Image: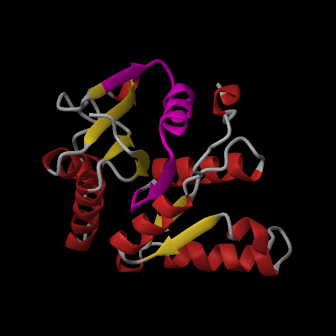
Amino acid sequence: MNPEFSICVYCGSRPGERPEFSEAAKAVGQWIGQHGGQLVYGGGRTGLMGTVAEATRLAGGRVVGIIPKALVDKELANPLCDELHVVDTMHERKAMMGERADAFIALPGGIGTFEELFEIWTWRQLGYHDKPTGILNTAGYYDGLLGFLAHSVREGFMGDWQMALIRTGTDATKLLTALRAEVPLHPREDRLSENL
């Protein structure tokens, strides 16, 4: 099967404290699979990572996992991926995830999720890619971050145009549909590999 599109999902290797987080991850995976898509993610089978991967697989989507050697045991590399790439460094992981995806979405997660989200957002700002990026704000998880980002704009360290590079939403279906619609019909060659 050749997927119609690839969506990179950044999310936690833990499930979090609220059932809504796992429900959102499942909804994201189901949407990707039901729409003939491909999941690109961190390659683990624990937490929200495992939930979104399994939901994608069961809904008929392709699953591409990318995991550094150092995390193969810690995040329990997922042997059910259609492709599982074990790389040497986090830099390789993130660059490959970026190259294999047409769009990006962040679900609830910890410091790794934040770092991946901010890096792919920065890369878009710098012109390394023109792929849409979103934040799924499940159960208000990102309220504090979004408030801080608005504060950064008010204080003059960011501009409204930078905030416009990120789409936010609370409904997985609506956000994914919007991101899919923004995927360039004729994407230019990105320069993500330059970041290795």
Q: Residue at x 40, y 50 (%)?
A: 9
Q: Nearer the viewer, residue 183 or 9?
A: 183
Residue 148 magenta-highlighted: no
The answer to whether residue 71 is left or right of residue 77 is right
Q: Residue at x 30, y 54 (%)?
A: 32
Q: Nearer the viewer, residue 83 or 60?
A: 60
Specify how the rendered protein is coloured.
secondary structure
Q: Give the extent of the magenta segment.
A: 84-109
The answer to whether residue 159 is left or right of residue 68 is right
Residue 102 magenta-highlighted: yes
**Looking at the picture, how far across and down is residue 159, in whole percent?**
81, 71
Q: Nearer the viewer, residue 137 or 73?
A: 137
In the picture shown, does residue 83 fall above or below 11? above
The answer to whether residue 60 is left or right of residue 166 is left
Residue 190 lies in quadrant: top right
Q: Residue at x 61, y 45 (%)?
A: 186
Residue 188 lies in quadrant: top right
Residue 183 visible, this angle: yes
Q: Farthest residue to the front: give it.
A: 186
**Looking at the picture, how far across and down is residue 97, in whole percent?**
48, 36
Residue 14 visible, this angle: no
Q: Residue at x 69, y 79 (%)?
A: 150
**Looking at the picture, how far across and down is residue 139, in whole percent?**
35, 79
Q: Nearer the viewer, residue 188 or 173?
A: 188
In the picture shown, does residue 185 fall above or below 92? below
In the picture shown, does residue 116 fall above or below 173? above
The answer to whether residue 176 is left or right of residue 81 is right
